[in-house]
Amino acid sequence: MLKLLDGPQTLGRGRIFWSCFLAVLAGALIYPVFADSYDVGNFAYFLIWIFMALGLCLMWGYGGMLSFGQTFFFGIAGYGYGVLAINMGGGTATIAALVLSVVIAMIAAGILGYFMIWGGISGIFFGIVTLSATLVLAFFLGQTAGPEWHIGPARLNGFNGMKGMDPLTVGDFDIEGSALYYVMIALIVIVYIALRMLVNSSVGNVIVATRENPQRAEMLGYDVRKYQLLTFVIGSGLAGLSGALYTSWGQFITPSSIGLPAAAMPIVWVAFSGRNDLTATLVGSFLLLFGFQTITVYSQQAALVLMGVLLLATVMLAPQGFVLGIGKLVVDWWSRRRRRDEGPALADAGRLQSDET
Amino acid sequence: MALVDVKGVSKRFGGLTAVSEVDLSVNAGEVHCLIGPNGAGKSTLFKLIVGLYPPTTGSIFFDSVEITAERPYARVQRGMSIKMQAPSVFKELPVRQNIQIALQERLSGAERVAEEERLLALLNLADDGGKLAGALSHGQQQWLEIGMALALRPQLLLLDEPTAGMSPEETYKTGELIKSFNAEGMTVLVVEHDMAFVRQVAQRVTVLHLGKIFARGSLEAILEDQKVAEIYLGKTHAH
């Protein structure tokens, strides 16, 4: 199983990479000791979105399916968490509400994905249909201001948004502040490791084969539709996890979390980071979210313009993503330096070894 | 006994009839070559057999089971494997991973690694395992795709112009490779223009012309057939 952590589908392998990973993880774990609670809460907020970015990376970068509608599943799970938490009465039931809301998002992805994939929708049309679904949901939720729009005691509340749900709670302990931050770190590590193992497994082989040449993959005996649906459901489930955690974090959710500007954000994060690699997406998305939030404090318009500029710069200068590109440059530089230092014999050995992977 | 039975199959694209009322039987254990001039409908017939096109009329049987409505992956799982006319490999993935993807359903662990090595050596790609498949020459990509098709250990191997872009030496080696797999019991159906290659491997030959079966029989009989020479072989016949 552990062999799947390092494989052809993920950059960053070997002792040096995992030592860096552990060092970053250790830094993240001790961060709340030194930071004030406001900053820790903000960091937890950035981390909420990482799941959606990783899910889109899996679908787009590995599976070749550009979904423009990840906020559709974000919204379903976000509102789902609110409705369930309010109806189930808060407390420890919020954990069940979190799990169920993610399951509901995955079921929605299964239904939408089935019709799209079995209907032969691919390429740009995949993005158009998912974006349409997102806009329809945002529009629908926007017109639910009247008192008739409620599920049990949970009012949808139109553009003002749903509120009044409890945060994640175990017994009498609310998972907020540092506790929420640690939950986020634990979940990100679990999701990141699980996704690395998935993409480096035989299933991951078929997922990337389908991205490269679906007809060839089918001619090797794979029902590529099932693999595409699996990828879509997992990626959308992760968007749902972000949505449920978002609602739990802020104890509110509005249709603006689902609409067009929100739907465009994950595309920018993943494109800028490098859609073909989970680590690049993890690092790049965090940096962008951090930068975006920092600038938003001064001017939200400036932050949005910067996102647009970054997207254009990515398309023009680094179509494979800036973080991934920089990562590859560092690895190449490091490999060249090692070969030079270790002499021609070892350099050849290194080349042969990398050829085998 | 027929492994593949194509019965009265036609395929129309709008007003164009690419394949018309074709009956074709491929016996288990034979190397059967499908020849004919450009536009005869050979590749279309291949795609009908493997399920990439649905036939307009007619039925297709594999191992006595009707597969006309089955999707391509299901036909592959029954024991078919195809090498397409244009190289169809995973260009952005390393050569070794291309082979792995083809092998992973049949073998795992050390067995799979050993088979990967064997196939890469067999395909003259042992030194190129780490290269991206798209960086290989056209001929090497043809070899790789043949290797991926062979990795499935199919009962029926369909090869659509397997030697296009290959040197005479590579073409000869491909022929010997096909013969060696046929000697182990694999049935092979080949579309090919290179008559030297057809002479090297064919046990039976079917000639398609304008979407219809024009002639069929042993290689010798087809080579003797003056009408076939007129429509297709031309000067090649004299070689």
Image: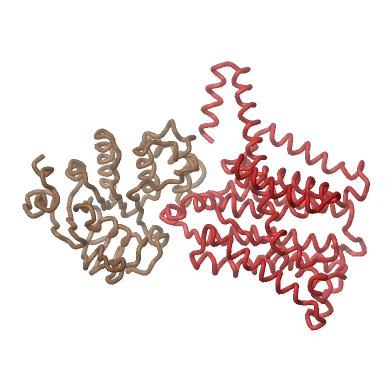
Identify the residue shown where x is 46% and y is 55%.
Answer: A214
Q: Is residue B36 left or right of residue A353?
A: left
In this view of the protein, can residue A2 be seen by the observer? no
Scheme by which the image is coloured: by chain
- Residue B12 location (% of width, % of height): 28, 67
- Residue A107 location (% of width, % of height): 64, 68
- Residue A270 location (% of width, % of height): 66, 49
Identify the residue shown where x is 51% and y is 27%.
Answer: A352
Residue B23 vs residue B45, the one in the foreground: B45
Q: Is residue A343 left or right of residue A216?
A: right
Task: Locate the C terminus of chain A and report the quarter of the image it occupies.
Answer: top right
- Residue B180 location (% of width, % of height): 27, 42
Residue A92 vs residue A57, the one in the foreground: A57
Identify the residue shown where x is 87% and y is 52%.
Answer: A41
Count of all numbered marks drawn on residues in the image: 0
Q: Is residue B51 above or below residue A334?
A: below
The chain letter corresponding to brown is B
**What is the display colour for chain A?**
red
Q: Quadrant of residue A73?
A: bottom right
Residue A78 vs residue B99, the one in the foreground: A78
